[in-house]
Every structure is written in C-alpha cells, then in structure tokens.
Image: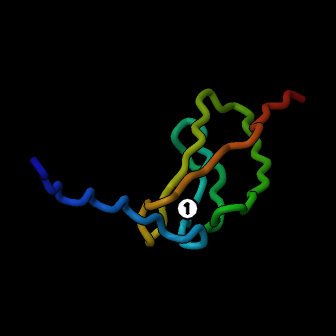
Amino acid sequence: MVKNSPPSPAPPESPPENEAAFKIEIKGDGKTLWRSKTLQAGNLAPYKVDLKGVNKIELLTHPTNDGSASDWALWLAPTLESK
C-alpha cells in the first residue's frame, strides 16, 4: 500500500533581531525607581538606583508598541551594595 501524508506545517518564522524591542524597569515598594529607554537585542542599560528605605524590589521587563515577539531580556548580575 502506498499512502501520501499531508506535508508538515512550516515552523513559524522569527522576526529579525532588530525588530525585538523592550523596556526594563526597577520598582521599589510598588513605585517606579528607574525605567530604561527602548532597548533592542544586544543593548545594555546600566543603572544605579538608591534603595534606601525600600522593602520590596521588582525587576521588570515590558514589551513596546511592536508587540512582545522575540522580546527577551536578561538582568545580568544585578547587585545590592550596602553603604
């Protein structure tokens, strides 16, 4: 017996890296302490935030108006320093 199977669907295409855009934000006790400009793949956003009196810290990533496709962000070695 010979049987013909329908072709497998093509995998979805990823948008080019330069189309991925996102912003990152640092919140302390629910208030925005710092927010980056719009970033794209390969961009770094140095930050320094005073956390005096803050009990809860949130490190957030937000999509931009281009949607959330391919929006990946890494917080590389965030550190807390005490003076």
The image position of residue 59, as x and y in percent, is: 60, 41
Numbered-mark total: 1
| Residue at 27% in and 59% down | 9
The image position of residue 70, as x and y in percent, is: 50, 59
Q: Is residue 25 above or below residue 30?
A: below
Q: Which residue is mark 1?
A: 22
Colour mode? Answer: rainbow
Tell me the quadrant of the picture where the C terminus can be found: top right
Front in this rendered view, residue 42 or 28: 42
Front in this rendered view, residue 2 or 28: 2
| Residue at 12% in and 52% down | 3
Q: Please identify the residue farthest to the front as the structure is shown.
A: 1
Is residue 79 rendered to the left or right of residue 12? right
Is residue 69 rendered to the left or right of residue 46? left
Secondary structure under the numbered disc 1 in the rendered image? strand
The image position of residue 65, as x and y in percent, is: 44, 71
The image position of residue 64, as x and y in percent, is: 48, 66
Front in this rendered view, residue 32 or 13: 13
Q: Is residue 82 above or below residue 41?
A: above
Q: Please identify the residue farthest to the left as the structure is shown.
A: 1
| Residue at 56% in and 36% down | 29
Q: Quadrant of residue 8?
A: bottom left
Circle 1 packing at 10 Å, graded few (<14), some (14-19), many (20+), is many
Is residue 28 rendered to the left or right of residue 8? right
Front in this rendered view, residue 21 or 79: 21
- Look at label 1 and name its amino acid: Phe
| Residue at 79% in and 54% down | 46
